[in-house]
Each structure stands twice: as structure tokens, then as C-alpha cells.
Amino acid sequence: MDITVLLPAGRLPLDIMAKAHAVAEKHGLAIYLSTAQNLRLLDVPEDRIDEVKEELAAVGADFKGPGKFPLPRVCIGERHCKLGLIDTEKLSDRILERFEGRPKTKPKFKIAVSGCVLCCSGVKTTDIGIHASKVGFDVYVGGKGGPYPKVGRRILHGVDEKSAIDAVEKIVEFHHDKTTQKQRMRKLIDHPEFPYPDEV
């Protein structure tokens, strides 16, 4: 079994990194950095899962599990990229704060945040994507990768941060209300009640 450690904004705290290395050495595990910007311990024996999780939890690690709100996938942002216009870590944190305490989130959708129009985090091919520009934030919905990739619909252009996060909340609530099982946003954007029917 694999164990996935959640890393908000793709940041890997040094204490978790050190403990993951020690645990991997102790149990003979491999470590994978996922495309979702999380850390995964591979091939954990069934009888050691609880032990491994306890060792990592002792340094503050949180784990992927059913019903958890998805961590936004982010680019490095303005502090580390000359093209970046915003602190993507802070925007990711604000999105997570908005949904803090939410009892359950239905699968399956992903969120991406980019600090500029290059969209290095895959904003346009993610269920919900936000990128910064010189005139504000653009919000996309319904993008997807895979064998039949689709560019998302741009539903907002040049809005402020609050409006972008409000839109994320409205889309997430719509997803929650209209799905009973795993469902990508792409299959919902043409629903007659979808709150953002028009591309801008």
C-alpha cells in the first residue's frame, strides 16, 4: 500500500522530509513526489501502515484520505519566479481556509493556481483553475488532461482575489449538489443550472 503525505502549495517542511527519509530507510520504502505535489511512500507493508503513519504524524504530517478538500496544485509564484505576479502559496492557503471545517468533499475534482498567464501548474487543463494577470485573476472550469484533453471554460476575467475564491466556492457547492459519485467538472459545465454558463 502507498501512503500519501499532503504538502500544501507543494512545500515540503524539512522535519517531514527528514522523517520521511528516516522512515523510508527503516522500512525499506521508496519515495515518490507526485504530480499533485504530494509525497508518497511506496509499497508500505499492510502490517506497518499504522506505524509509518504514526511516525510521520508525530512531526505534523497529514495524509490523503476520502472526503478531504483537494490541495491546489500551484506554481512557484512571485517570490521565486520573475514572471510571477502573486504569492501562489498565500492564495492556496486562502482557498483552503475558505473550505476549512467542511465535513466532506465529494471526489473527483482538482484545483490549480498559477502566478502568471503561462499557467505552469496546468490551470487551463484542471477542473478549477485560477491564474493571475496584470489586470486581475482569470478563472477556468472544466479543463482536463488524459487521452482526450480539454481546455477549461474561462468564466471570469480580470476579477479580484475575493471574487475568484467566491467563484471556487460556488462551483464546489454546485459539484457537491449535483453529484452522487466521482465526477469531473467537465461533465457538469453544460448542466442547465451551472452558475457560469458563458465563456468570457
Image (cartoon, rainbow, N blue to C red):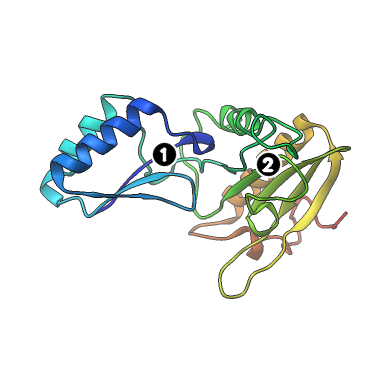
Q: Which residue is mark 2?
A: 168
Q: Label 2 is placed on what type of residue?
A: Val
The local secondary structure at tag 2 comes to helix
Decide which of tag 1 and tag 2 comes sooner along the chain: 1
User: In the image, residue 16 lies at what x, y percent?
Assistant: 34, 30
Q: Quadrant of residue 75?
A: top right
Front residue of this view, candidates 48 and 170: 48
Q: Residue at x 72, y 63 (%)?
A: 151
The local secondary structure at tag 1 comes to loop
Q: Residue at x 39, y 46 (%)?
A: 66
Circle 1/circle 2 CB separation < 8 Å: no
Q: Label 1 is placed on what type of residue?
A: Leu
Front residue of this view, candidates 112 and 175: 112
Labels 1, 2: front one: 1
Q: Residues within 10 Å of mark 1 (few under 14, many from 20)?
A: many
- Badge number at residue 6: 1
